[in-house]
Amino acid sequence: MRLSEFIVQHIDRIVDEWEKFAKTIKPAADTLSRAELRDHAKSILMAAARDMNTAQSKAEQAAKAKGEGPEKTPTLDQAAASHGEMRHTVGFDLVQMTSEFRHLRACVIRLWVESLESPELAYFQDMIRFNEAIDEALAESTAAYAEQVARSRDIFLAILGHDLRAPLQAVTMSTELLVRKVGLDAAALSYIARIKGGTRHMGGMVRDLLEFVRSRLGTSLPIERKPMDLAIACREAIEAACAGQPDCNPNVAITGDTHGAWDRGRIDQLLQNLIGNALQHGASSHEVNLSLSGNKQEVTLVVHNHGEPIAEDAIGTIFDPLVRSASEELGQPSTSLGLGLFIVKEVVNAHQGSITVTSNIDDGTTFTVVLPKI
């Protein structure tokens, strides 16, 4: 029996072997369902079988062995790439993911050879074609996995660089207030000068970091839900924001049950960026208003400020990365690099929530976030 025919006839048995091996990859496989363990195996094998039945010249074979030539098996590439992305998402490392293909190759050849009564010359060609298909699938899967790793790294660096600016601003403002105090001796002034120099240096490194990842942002934030009170997080976020804004005087209104299960670190990022955005873009003659209300299923957070409204044609891209307001684009002083609202949207998505924004000259700008409690 030719190898492609063997694969098709014994597809379930082969995928069972794949599943058994995937189950041994700890600890990532411990939480996976049977369908997740068998992820894309059947699609990869069926695509490989179809490729083996496709005519191939010696020149095409030589080019394929070098990873060159036209793409001949798009379904194989698609299934393999999806598999690489999925294995990264569920926690397999690159060695574990590639070991699945090694086991698949060995399993298919072993089962097929055991079924043969006598070897034929065509069988060797079948093995070559099968190995080519598995190598192609492995290459596509590895490339997709590596891309996911790069995207995760880049979004982490972008958020890290963006969020470091808030505590740096608080340190800078505090040193400025200390300098204004009378009666400081030379030693104290020297210490303050060192702090200011250090914050400037760190600010430069943060700017360099953000520039590095400016065009390399990714998606999909991991979260770890734990019981928490969102009201406490809101009050602490307001306090932290006002440390860098001595004149800020926000109004806070909290009603209902604000307890739920969320990722506290990610929620802090969301609050800091929403509040910081309102303080930055709000009119100085108006206060920033934050309201939080909760029921049995969800909580609703509303952050409102008056000031220059968001342009109607910019509403649709307000949550895109590296998007800044028109005033910032014209060169007016700003601390924004267009990452804050992108981070907010990512945190909301990770919690399966929703966020909307309305903005006009009469009512001001309002961001409304709805987060399910579980």
Image: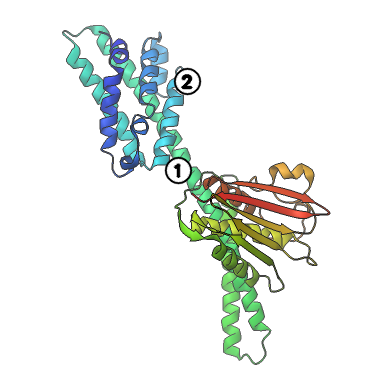
269 or 217, which lies in front?
A: 269
Residue under label 1: 149
In the figure, 13 relative to 260: above or below? above
Alpha carbon of mark 1 to alpha carbon of mark 2: how far? Answer: 23 Å
| In this picture, residue 234 sits left or right of residue 309 | left
Whole-percent x and y of residue 42?
36, 22
| In this picture, residue 121 sits left or right of residue 84 | left
Residue 334 in sight in this render: no
Q: Earlier in the sequence, mark 1 or mark 2?
A: 2
Quarter location, residue 232: bottom right
| In this picture, residue 293 sits left or right of residue 31 | right
Whole-percent x and y of residue 215?
60, 45
Residue under label 2: 74
Figure colour scheme: rainbow
Q: Amino acid at mark 1?
A: Val
In the figure, 7 relative to 161: above or below? above
| Residue drawn at (78%, 66%) of the image | 284
| In this picture, residue 338 sits left or right of residue 128 | right
| Residue drawn at (71%, 51%) of the image | 324
**How dense is the environment of label 2, judged by Cα within 10 Å: few (below 14), some, or many (20 and up)?**
few
Query: Of helix, strand and loop, which one carries label 2?
Result: helix
Quarter occupied by the N terminus: top left
Quarter location, residue 129: top left
